[in-house]
Amino acid sequence: MIDSDLLTGASLDELKQGYRESADSFTCICCGQRVEKGVVYPVDDRLYEAQRYIRHHIAAAHGSVFAHLVGLDKSAHGLSDLQRRLLTLLYDGRSDDEIKKALGAGSLSTIRNHRFILREKERQARLFLAIMELLNERLTGDETTGGRTRSRAGRAASGEAQGAGGRAGSGEGAGDGRAVRGRPRGAASDQAILARYFPHGLEGPLQHFGGSTPMKHKRIIAAAVAGRFAPGRRYSEREVNEILEPIAEDYVLLRRLLVDFGYLSRLPDGSQYWRGETDQERVSPVDRRKELKRLAREAKTEGGVFQVRNSKNGMVWIGVTPNFRSLNGHRFQLEMGSHKCRELQQAWNEFGPDAFVFEPLETLEEPETGYFDRDDALKKLKRKWLEKLQPFGDRGYNLPSELDEGNR
């Protein structure tokens, strides 16, 4: 399950490249690691600028963007386990015959049928994406015109009514620049819209709210709901959801609107939310950047050294990760037969998934100030545990040459 808007709020290009770009940083959509622009990052004997470094991080920490996305829960992409395995094998460049053997399929025609189903799924996804983009463009266009989309007949009827009022020279709103009766504007219009969606009052639940709600109405609803959050307080995503779930069935959409319209601000990894500033509360960009950096330090992801232990024979494999929450990526690679450690992969295939346990060994301590090379620190931490456990030969699945990685 996706627990933040890093993925759900990313564009197609951002999903493919694996990171999001802001004015001063790049953020990995796989784990939330943030890389500041204008900083040079040393990796082994090379120096990387920020964008190249975030790409290096994705390859080193997650294998590939493809592996991370395919490894997500089914609720994220709708793919069955069989389809995920097939896609992974295709991505690895396997032939149809190799795929047939790996999947245990009866014939090559079965593989070709699976390929056809995937192409159909791709075609449907493109059409659906185009439909939704056209819908969003239409809703955005409605917002710029005040949310009033009328037919020719409606415009003609309106024109006739206005003309009649003008000829009569009397009647409210005729020729004096005032609003036509029945068309409230400004605060009165907002109150009428809110009354439609909150029939039991602003403290009650939303009704008739969803993706098809006009954009102008969504903005008004978000502004009203923002009042349920206390200024200056920090909320976890769970606390935000607990506030929004009683309000709307699609509380995820409501949460996203609060962020998109600026009524709620959040950290890049979605771990903390707070009410956006009003005009009176607005602070300078410098102070805001300091506050965001402070919050990022408080909500930083935890990474470090972990082991994959074979409970049948006690052999282990030592690995590192910048985010312990991404360990499922290693499990998925093993399930797909594509893990980078061949010895561990062979053992996994022999003993089965139930024989292996993933266990954190040590959390990486990061300083609160100053430059910090996380990748280099992880390598040194891994070397420490390799020297301590000696998971080589009959004791584990690592190679002795991995000891040299911490010295580079």
Image (cartoon, grey):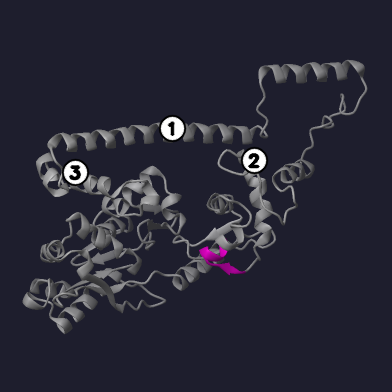
Q: Is residue 94 visible?
A: no
Label 1: element kind: helix
Which quarter of the figure is the N terminus placed in? bottom left
Q: Amino acid at mark 2?
A: Lys
Mark 3 neighbour class, 10 Å CA radius: few under 14, some 14 to 19, many 20 or more:
some
Q: How far is disc 1 from disc 3 in space, using C-alphas?
A: 26 Å
Q: What residue sits right under mark 1 in the picture? A: 130
Side of 365 where 138 appears, left or right: right
**What residue appears at the point 28 percent right and 37 percent down from the top-left corner?**
118
State the image coordinates of residue 48 (x, y, percent, origin top left). 26, 60
Q: Where residue 187 sits: x, y (%)? A: 77, 45
Q: Which is nearer the eye, 331 or 129?
A: 331
Q: What's the amino acid at mark 3? A: Leu
**Separation (CA) of disc 2 from disc 1:** 22 Å
Q: Which residue is mark 3?
A: 90
Q: Residue at x 68, y 34 (%)?
A: 146
- Residue 237 on the magenta span: yes
In the rendered image, residue 25, in percent from the top left (x then y), is placed at 41, 58
Q: Secondary structure at mark 2?
A: helix
